[in-house]
Image (tube, helix red, strand yellow):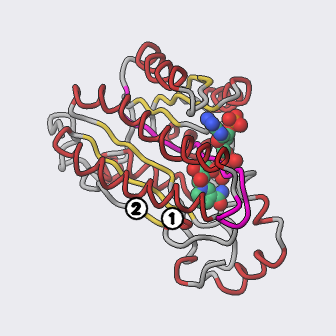
Amino acid sequence: MNLDRLMSFENNIRDRFNLEGRVAVITGASKGIGAAIAKGLAEFGASVVVSSRKLEAVEAVAEEIRSAGGKAHAEACHVGDPLARKELITNTLNHFGSLDILVNNAAINPYYGPFDTISDEAFYKTFQVNLDAVRALSNLAASHMKKEKWGSIIHLSSIESFHPGKGMGVYSLTKATLNMLTMTQAKEWGREGIRVNAIAPGLIETKFSAALTDNASIMRHIEENVPAGRVGQPEEIAGLAVFLASDAGSYCTGSIYTVDGGFMLTGAL
Ligand SMILES: NC(=O)c1ccc[n+]([C@@H]2O[C@H](COP(=O)([O-])OP(=O)(O)OC[C@H]3O[C@@H](n4cnc5c(N)ncnc54)[C@H](OP(=O)(O)O)[C@@H]3O)[C@@H](O)[C@H]2O)c1
């Protein structure tokens, strides 16, 4: 790590959360957890590149951030598209001049059902977006971060990575492999100044999880068994992302952090 850039330990803990002068890219940031993380990082001073497949949708989030006094730029990027990934990183460097934080948040779950009846197409597509795109985008960001000996990469995993949720085996498989990618990257890139961590949310109320949160029996299970007694909100993930992105988290690398209201203490769904 470029220790010259690390904030002095004489600074108070509040200062160590300051992201002024840092540039962050967040994928899948038009809504849900990605949008909440983009807003959170911007609130702490980072210049954020808000990205998803739909330019209009990310432009709206970027405008919201700018109206609140933050620095934001919108970029369309389908993370499964190699050319779009390259452009996302190049355009970030051209627009804001650096890249310090990458949040790999975009993911898909196109199939609910038994593990053995998913089509090959859906199987590989889930891996392409949830794992391969994360690997490739991290490599692109790391090639810049290595030159600076400085960077924080955050992946969005899931509690499904620790146990297969009913009908979500393939999604669970991609997220479990993402955990190993997190640890591998952290180990290989640590001496290059790059920290890599993952956040594993429990059930968070977003469009992505609507099939679960609209299910009365699942909601009853959550209310009766999960210590928090409720599902989470996207904003409840943003604080940890700010911590991991900032100097407050400077000794954190290679870990998978659950944010799940205690869900892991209960049985699987
Ligand atoms: N919600 C939960 O309960 C939960 C739990 C555990 C983990 N997670 C993880 O948290 C992350 C965010 O989920 P969320 O619940 O916030 O989902 P969400 O509200 O549905 O948002 C998904 C975001 O990803 C974008 N996206 C989808 N496919 C994309 C692609 N191929 N390329 C680029 N962007 C793409 C969407 O925007 P566009 O449509 O504009 O592209 C949207 O901005 C995911 O990694 C998910 O696995 C969620």
* Quarter of the figure with residue 67: top right
Q: Which numbered marker is on residue 135?
A: none
* SS of the residue under disc 2: strand
- 108 is higher (above) or lower (below) than 252: above
Identify residue for label 1. Answer: 161
Residue 16 placement (x, y as % from top left): 31, 47
Q: Amino acid at mark 2?
A: Ile
The foreground one among 43 and 214 is 214
The answer to whether 85 is drawn above or below residue 247 in the figure is above
Image quarter hosting the N terminus: top left
Q: Are marks 1 and 2 in contact (CB under 8 Å)?
A: yes
Q: Is residue 60 visible?
A: yes
Left or right of 265: which side holds 189? Answer: left
Q: How many marks?
A: 2
Residue 86 included in the magenta stretch of the image: no
Q: Residues within 10 Å of mark 1 (few under 14, many from 20)?
A: some
Q: Secondary structure at mark 1?
A: helix
Label 1 residue near ligand 1, CB within 8 Å: no
Q: Which mark is residue 256?
A: 2
Q: Which residues are magenta?
A: 99-117
State the separation of the CA atoms marked 1 and 2: 10 Å
Give the x, y percent position of residue 169.
61, 65
Q: Is residue 108 magenta?
A: yes
Residue mark closest to the camera, 1 vs 2: 1
**Residue at the location (57% across, 41% down)?**
129
Q: Residue at the top extreme?
A: 94
